[in-house]
Image: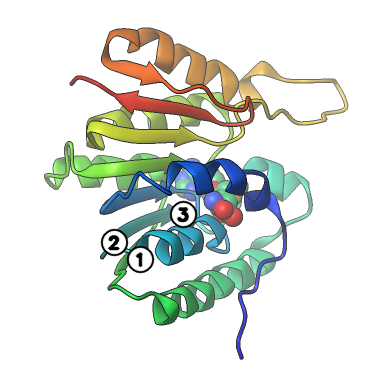
Amino acid sequence: MADFEFSNRWFQTSKPVWDEIFSTFRPARILEIGSFEGASACYLITTIGAHQPVEIHCIDTWEGGIEHQAGGFVASNMSEVESRFHRNIALAQSRSAHPAPVMFYKNRSDLALAALLSGGKANYFDFIYVDGSHQAPDVLFDAVLSFKLLAINGLLIFDDYNWSENLPQGKDILRCPKPAIDAFVNLNFRKLRLLAAPINQCYVVKTAD
Ligand SMILES: C[S@@+](CC[C@H](N)C(=O)[O-])C[C@H]1O[C@@H](n2cnc3c(N)ncnc32)[C@H](O)[C@@H]1O
């Protein structure tokens, strides 16, 4: 029997907390920024799709982030990653008890998010997962536009809150998500609620527009 093709275990660290969250929270419309081979998207298809229909929108350039390119991922690796994404999604859909249509946008997140917003999807999504570029200016843009696309009581999860690169010159504050997530949370403090969570991810509930 075919099995999923994942080359890493990134998603496994989030899984225990996600199992808890999604045992009671059942979003019908999901947006994911950063899909890679589809590990998180396949989790959502199989977990939510076991109970109800779920619609998932995936944004990725499938070019890798700066950190992937620095780590030796080149375009040919990424085209294999993209092929695995499509095979993994098809497998998850074939195993889902309920329909789980997946829309993909092979584009930079700033352009794809702006298109979703101008296409009438304000307040549309129940859950948005931000796991694309890990560069602070990009994460801030993803956060701000995602908040516009998120419904009231919707959940926003930022991955890698506590992540930074091991650069020869040490850590670079602009090459990690944390300052962007902090700025976004601080500026929207009256419109959101933070959930208690392990430090590697940041969980935000939208409470107002
Ligand atoms: C950490 S991976 C996502 C992992 C995935 N969520 C999982 O569970 O396996 C980050 C992805 O973001 C994509 N990415 C990086 N910068 C991006 C950008 N500016 N716009 C869209 N996608 C981007 C990369 O191509 C990469 O596939």
Q: Circle 2 is placed at which residue position? A: 54
Alpha-carbon neighbours of circle 3 within 10 Å: few (<14), some, or many (≥20)?
many
Q: Decide if ligand 1 comes within 8 Å of the CB at mark 3.
A: yes
Residue shown at the point (72%, 65%) measured from the top left:
7
First in sequence: mark 3 vs mark 2: 2
Q: Nearer the viewer, residue 14 or 57?
A: 14
Q: Nearer the viewer, residue 117 or 63?
A: 117
Q: Kindly give the residue lying farthest to the right in the view shown.
A: 168
Q: Amino acid at mark 1?
A: Gly
Q: Amino acid at mark 3?
A: Asp
Disc 1 from disc 2: Cα separation: 6 Å
Q: Can you tell which quarter of the image residue 151 is in?
A: top left
Q: Secondary structure at mark 3?
A: strand
Instruction: For the N terminus, give its image quadrant.
Output: bottom right
Q: Position of residue 205 (x, y in %)?
A: 34, 26
Instruction: Say which mark, if any, is on residue 60.
Output: 3
1 vs 3, front mark:
1
Disc 1 from disc 3: Cα separation: 22 Å
3 vs 2, front mark:
2
Q: Can you tell which quarter of the image residue 102 is in?
A: bottom left
Q: Circle 1 is placed at which residue position? A: 49
Q: Position of residue 137 (x, y in %)?
A: 50, 24
Asked if labels 2 and 1 touch by Cβ distance under 8 angstroms, the answer is yes
Q: Position of residue 165 (x, y in %)?
A: 75, 31
First in sequence: mark 1 vs mark 2: 1
Q: Kindly give the residue lying farthest to the left in the view shown.
A: 120
Residue shown at the point (16%, 37%) measured from the top left:
122
Residue shown at the point (43%, 58%) measured from the top left:
44
